[in-house]
Amino acid sequence: MRKPLVLRHPSILVFLAVLAVFTVGVTILSTGYGTGVISTSMVKTLGKTLCLALAAVAMDLVWGYAGILSLGQMAFFALGGYMIGMWLMVARTETIVTGSLANLPIPPTAAEINQAVATQIFGVVGSDQFPAIWFLSGSLIGQLALVVLVPGLLALVFGWLAFRSRVNGVYLSILTQAMTLALALYLFQNDSGLRGNNGLSGLQNIPGLDAVPQESLSIWFFWASAVALGLGYLLVSWVASGKFGSVTRAIRDDEARVRFLGYSVESYKLVVFTLAAVITGIAGALYYPQAGIINPAELAPIASIYLAVWVAIGGRGRLYGAVIGAIVVSMLSSWFTGGRAPDVNLGFYTIKWVDWWQVLLGLSFVLVTLFAPKGISGIFDALAHLRPPRRGGTPLGPDMGALQEREAVE
């Protein structure tokens, strides 16, 4: 009888245990439910970091396991944020408008309230009507469904067009980046229906929870982010294991050979690409209520490149490596760019980390690629004495990674 997934891969249990301990520790030290050692802003930063880690896990599924270097993952991340942000803005604005009109001699009609809400939201872009894409904005369930459907459908359509045309390698990466840039440029327009450059703001104010302080809300979102990361890690681990995972890794290593063996390469790649987009969209839906605002700048191609850098530094092809990379690099980024890192005076020049952080990040990516391709997770491999198989004899295939004679006999 086959063992359960967590017993076949003990690293999953280790990861979930560490995540649980971390969640409990932050809760105990938080301002809302603990000793107050960790401020509310720091709790929000940690919650957002867990969401970025979930996006990194999805990126590792696409890149580390399927070999698809997607430079458009943050487009799905931002779309998830926009979908939940639409409901948050409508519900919050409706509460404000209803309260302000409650003292009128004649109670306002539903149409008047709707008109006032639309004016309040879209007046900044010169409109007083809800765009067609906001047709479900008054329904929380509807917008939660769109959090999954919109990124998933975009990935499904884009992936089907790209994979059926057998676009691979750097060309596919350029296409994903072009998709992200095109979407960002469209959303910057005032007539896009999403308030153009203004984006959606005030997302940290959850409708119906006005009496709940931000100290408590920050912990609730932190818990939700931790649960989402744990469930996402389990799901991706399950997908990457078994026959499906083996075929996916085979596609990464030698796509032509897998196709000649009779597998539908395009179908496998499309499933992985779409699933990763859905997971990334969910991560974005949890991230932006903690950030409080979302605008088209969040879709900038550089954001997706950062995501790839995190996965590479953490260790591509190892899910815990993607999490480590996302957490370490994003927290260091907050520290350096937040002005908390002390400047370094060299006498002839003063290094200000706010200006030099991106250079340091780029240098780290180059060094990891050249000298430590396993990333930070390679340290754990060394501690666990994990080594690649000893290969020798005559190759049994046309490429360097093919099974060799001695390995086949053993």
Image: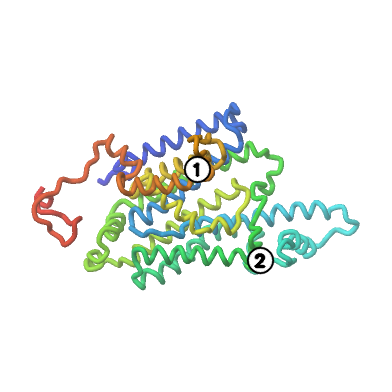
Circle 1: residue type: Ser
Disc sitting over residue 151 in the figure: none
Task: Identify which residue is drawn at 22% across, 42% down.
Answer: 387
Question: Tag 1, which secondary structure?
Answer: helix
Q: Return the residue nearer the eye: 25 or 365.
A: 365
Q: Position of residue 365 (x, y in %)?
A: 38, 48
Q: Is residue 190 left or right of residue 56?
A: right
Q: Is residue 53 left or right of residue 165?
A: right
Question: Tag 2, which secondary structure?
Answer: helix
Q: Which of the 4 quarters of the picture holds residue 394?
A: bottom left
Please state which of the two labelled residues, at mark 2 or mark 1, is closer to the viewer.
1
Q: What residue did someone put label 2 on? A: 190
Q: Is residue 13 left or right of residue 352?
A: left
Q: Return the residue nearer the eye: 127 or 105.
A: 127
Circle 2: residue type: Asn
Q: Position of residue 103 (x, y in %)?
A: 87, 52
Q: Position of residue 128 (x, y in %)?
A: 75, 66
Q: Pick out the residue farthest to the right.
A: 105
Q: Return the residue nearer the eye: 237 or 251.
A: 251
Q: Position of residue 67 (x, y in %)?
A: 33, 58
The answer to which of marks 2 and 1 sits earlier in the sequence is 2
Task: Identify which residue is drawn at 33% across, 52% down.
Answer: 240
Q: What residue did someone put label 1 on? A: 333
